[in-house]
Amino acid sequence: MSSGTAVSVEAHLRSGQVLLMITAVGWGLNWAVLKFVLQDWPPLFARGVAGLLGAVGLALVAGLRGEAFAVPRHARLRLAVAAVVNVFAWMGFTALSLNWLKVSEGALIAYSMPIWAMLIAWPLHGERPNRRSLLALILGIAGIVVLMGGPDLAGGKLPGVLFAAGAAILFAFGTVTAREPIAMSPTALTAWQVALGCLPMVMLGMFLERPQVSALSAPGLSGLVYMAVGPMALCYLTWFGALRRLPGSVAATGMLLVPIVGTLAAVPLLGDTLGARELGAMVLTLSGVGLALRRSS
């Protein structure tokens, strides 16, 4: 390899690392910012509106790039299923979980998804867990038990735990079953998924939650704009850019920063506490997730 090629490869990897950091920080901060919006609007409606705004932004970017929006006929059902498990369930359930959980709790449980993906791949694809996989499962569950154990769970946090865990399990199911990518440009495909997943959220929110649209305060509006422009539009673009430049295992492992950023951001922004239990649970769960990702790399 020539020196010029080596420099080019190194620059390619560094740019991928920068894009990965932008993604992790943007998605991590979103957990704390969402709490501000939830003070004014109910969860399904708030997350759905932010997602639709983000989908419009992604569609504009795809249009400027000249990407085609036509969905292949044979892929329409797969696109609908992906929108349900990767967007509707992930965004809707995680938003609902924050009605009962702190940011540190919701984010940590949600980002246990690689552990569930490992378990789901066993019956579906015959990928039998090895000792490292079982250790990953034990560490991940132990972290969640430490985080949610004691009187807090009995004190009313169980619905939040179930919603966060449901989001992680359904997202993991979508990841395991989507082995064959849909033949579309990534930005246009993401715009479709986000729009199809968020439109039912808005409709259900209007019917079930009956939001007061005028109740959105200045902090809530700022949070809504951030959610649409940052996590839903910019961060998806930087995520795809990182995937084009980095190995998949590196990109997946980098996502372990998301619950850490969300937890740390919630301390100054929301006044959440970060004690020994939260830190211990974070170490246990993220160690398990790291082992699960290492096995799949």
Image (cartoon, rainbow, N blue to C red):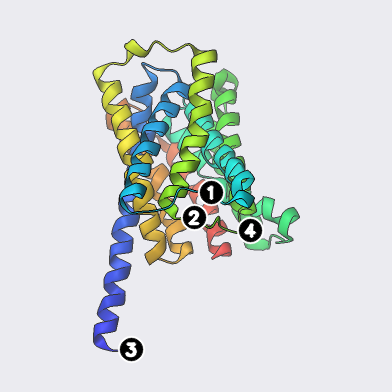
**Residue found at x 24% / y 84%:** 4
Q: Amino acid at mark 3?
A: Met
Asked if residue 216 is positioned above or below residue 142 in the image, the reply reads above
**At numbered mark 4, what does the secondary structure look like: helix, strand or loop?**
helix
Q: Residue at x 43, y 59 (%)?
A: 251
- Seen at 37% across and 66% down, the residue is 245
How far apart, in angstroms, are the residues tagged by discs 4 and 3? 37 Å
Determine which residue is flagged by label 1: 71
Would you place residue 147 above or below residue 241 in this image? Answer: above
Q: What crowding class fits label 2: few (fewer than 14 Cα within 10 Å), some (14-19), or many (20 or more)? A: some
- Kind of residue at disc 2: Met
Q: Are marks 1 and 2 in contact (CB under 8 Å)?
A: yes
- Mark 4 is on which residue type? Ser
Residue 281, image x and y in percent?
49, 41
User: How many angstroms separate mark 1 from mark 3 (CA)?
Assistant: 41 Å
Does dot 2 land on a helix, a strand or a loop? loop
Q: Tag 4 or tag 1, which sits nearer the N-term?
A: 1
Residue neighbourhood size for the residue with mark 1, other residues' Cα within 10 Å, grouped as few (<14), some (14–19), many (≥20): some
Picture layout, residue 273 above or below residue 288: above
Q: Nearer the viewer, mark 1 or mark 3?
A: 1
Residue 130 horizontal/vertical position (percent): 68, 63
Q: Nearer the viewer, mark 1 or mark 4?
A: 1
Across and down, in percent, residue 20 comes to 35, 55
Nearest the eye: 12 or 57: 57
Q: Which residue is mark 2?
A: 184
Q: Judging from the image, what secondary structure is the residue with disc 1 in?
A: loop
Could one spot residue 20 in this view of the protein? yes
- Indicate which label's residue lies in the foreground, 4 or 2: 2
State the residue position of label 3.
Answer: 1
